[in-house]
Amino acid sequence: MNTLFAICATYEVDDGSARGFVLQRRDPDGSAKPWPILVTRKGNNFYGFENACPHQGARLDKRPGEFMDEEGNFLVCSQHGAQFDLDTGRCFIGPCQGKALQPVQLVIDDGDVCLSGVDLDEEDGLDIDDPEDDVPEVQITSD
């Protein structure tokens, strides 16, 4: 069985919304690099995606945590307005129409949203540059 890494509690992601995290992923050569992801929720289902627009690779949230359109129905890229489904990550409006966000494998375990199948670096206190200073801190723990 793959190691599970708890990202957050299920109650921390509201239904019909998204929450972003910056983790530290280990590359095959052993080096570690920042890895921005987002977790979305529709009802009791959770979905994970890399926080990178398939159009140009930029983060969806120019301002940390701002992923949703004005009506709160779809993920939106703040760079060029592309819109994505919360559950599939598929773009249906914008320059990357027909493409999709890169999925991240999630497992719900005892009320926690966890990552599986990814080699994370478990270093605490990461010094990762974010677009703004008001990004919530996230501590990654393994089960």
Image: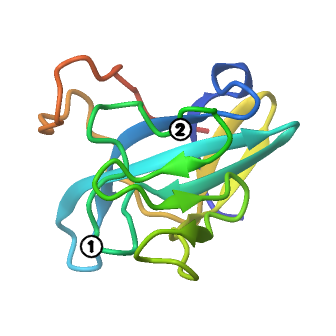
Could you say which is closer to the camera, residue 1 or residue 86?
86
Question: Which residue is pictured at 55% across the width and 74% down the height?
Answer: 100
Badge number at residue 56: 1
Residue kind at label 1, given as amino acid type: Gln
Query: Residue 122's spot in the image, x, y percent?
Result: 34, 43
x then y, percent, for residue 130: 18, 36
Q: Which residue is mark 2?
A: 68
Q: Position of residue 68 (x, y in %)?
A: 53, 38
Can I make out residue 79 in this image? yes
Residue at 87%, 37% in the rendered image: 44
Left or right, 40 with reference to 66 = right
Residue 102, image x and y in percent? 51, 71
At 35% from the left and 50% from the top, the residue drawn is 36
Q: Residues within 10 Å of mark 1 (few under 14, many from 20)?
A: few
In the rendered image, the quadrant that contains the C terminus is top right
Query: In this orientation, does residue 141 appear?
Result: no
Query: Mark 1 vs mark 2: which is more N-terminal?
Result: 1
Residue sitting nearer the eye, 59 or 30: 59
The secondary element bearing badge 2 is classed as loop
Q: Which mark is residue 115?
A: none
Quarter holding residue 106: bottom right
Quadrant of the snapshot with the N terminus: bottom right
Instruction: Please name the amino acid that badge 2 sits on.
Output: Met
